[in-house]
Image: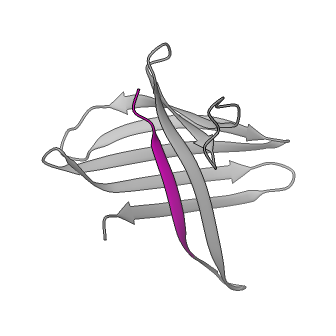
């Protein structure tokens, strides 16, 4: 089993200001579900804090691999779309889109991660 411990940091920019952000996730292949499960970090060997279960929707067609997921956080709902692009066998870009709605949240996010 090969899990990926992932840490991201950067700046969140909005109309009301800019502030620092940091998040940590653990990406794990789940053979029983044939999914890529993403857990909140820091890494928990018991894997109890599932964020999303990504299910493939499309294979590489020049646009990359596409996976989708849903997540419920309290009374709010998240729809997620992850697009993985490759340069040969190497992962070159990940694009993550979220649509979030509910009684306490209403926003969309579009994040592009690239190798430095």
The color scheme shown is one colour
**Quarter-of-image position of residue 107:** bottom right
For the N terminus, give its image quadrant. Answer: top left
For the residue pair 43 and 91, the one nearer the viewer reads as 43
Query: Residue at horizontal 49%, vertical 47%?
Result: 5
Query: Residue at horizontal 31%, vertical 65%?
Result: 115
Count of residue discs? 0
Instruction: Decide if residue 56 is on the left or right side of residue 108.
Output: left
Residues drawn in magenta: 1-10
For the residue pair 115 and 112, the one nearer the viewer reads as 115
Residue 66 place in picture, x, y as percent: 37, 39
Query: Residue at horizontal 61%, vertical 60%?
Result: 23
Instruction: Decide if residue 10 is on the left or right side of residue 83.
Output: right
Q: Residue furthest front?
A: 45
Magenta stretch: helix, strand or loop mostly: strand
Instruction: Decide if residue 76 is on the left or right side of residue 78.
Output: right
**Quarter-of-image position of residue 61:** top left
Residue 43 place in picture, x, y as percent: 60, 43
For the C terminus, give its image quadrant. Answer: bottom left
Residue 3 falls within the magenta-colored stretch = yes
Residue 6 place in picture, x, y as percent: 49, 52
Up-down relation of residue 107 to residue 19 (above or below): above
Q: Residue furthest top?
A: 32
Residue 12 place in picture, x, y as percent: 61, 76
Query: Residue at horizontal 62%, vertical 33%?
Result: 45
Residue 70 falls within the magenta-colored stretch = no
């Amino acid at each position: 089993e090969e899990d990926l411990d992932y840490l991201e940091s950067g700046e969140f920019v909005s109309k009301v200001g800019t502030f620092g952000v940091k998040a940590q996730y653990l990406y794990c292949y789940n053979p029983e579900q044939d999914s890529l499960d993403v857990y909140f970090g820091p890494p928990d060997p018991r894997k109890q804090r599932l964020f999303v279960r990504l299910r493939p929707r499309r294979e590489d067609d020049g646009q990359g691999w596409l996976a989708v997921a849903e997540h419920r956080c309290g009374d709010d709902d998240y729809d997620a779309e992850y697009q993985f692009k490759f340069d040969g066998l190497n992962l070159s870009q990940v694009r993550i889109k979220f649509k979030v709605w509910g009684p306490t949240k209403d926003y969309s996010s579009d994040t592009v991660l690239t190798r430095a």
